[in-house]
Image (cartoon, rainbow, N blue to C red):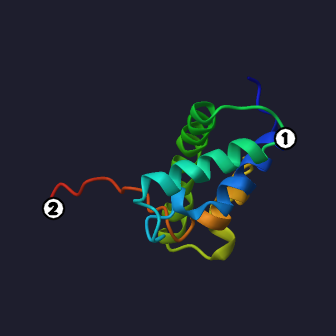
Amino acid sequence: MEWSAELTLEFLELYEREACIWNPRDPLHKNRIAVSDAWKRIEYSLSVEVSVPELKKKKESLMATFRPIMQKVIASQKSGGGPDDVYKSNWFAFDAMFKFLQGIYQPKSGLNAEG
């Protein structure tokens, strides 16, 4: 299935509402039934017919793009530059994902050899 930018943003809006899926601090995050029900709500609410496995695949694809961009943002904040030097992504889905994942998703930094 071909995902348009509009459909992707629609999916992200529905995904954001289901915090038990993406927020490890959500009380229902470890409840497999609640998470499964949340995925089904997204499936039934999306404007096109897409199966839960396809939705999960899309989520993983989006995260695979989001992670390195988020790492660039964090690295640019630590570089000592001013606010104008912080990396700004032009990827269409970044702002939609950043809005709800910024305090939750912490990218893994490189391993410190001295560590």
Label placed on residue 115: 2
Dot 2: few (<14), some (14–19), or many (≥20) neighbours within 10 Å? few
Q: Is residue 115 left or right of residue 81?
A: left
Element under disc 2:
loop
Visible residue check, residue 112:
yes
Residue at 77% x, 25% y is 2
Q: Height in image: 22 above or below 80?
A: above
Q: Residue furthest left?
A: 114
Q: Which residue is at the front of the view, 115 or 85?
A: 115
Q: Which quadrant of the figure contains the C terminus?
A: bottom left
Residue type, label 1: Ser
Q: Is residue 110 left or right of residue 24?
A: left
Rendering quarter of residue 43? top right
Instruction: Name the side, left or right, on which 74 lies relative to 82.
Output: left
* Residue 92 as seen in the image, left or right of residue 32: right
Residue 72: percent from left, percent from top:
54, 55
Distance of label 1 from label 2 (alpha carbons)? 49 Å
The residue lying toward the viewer, choosing from 84 and 101, is 101
Three-letter code for the amino acid on which mark 2 is drawn: Gly
Residue 47: which numbered mark, if any? 1
Q: Residue at x 44, y 62 (%)?
A: 106
SS label for mark 1 = loop
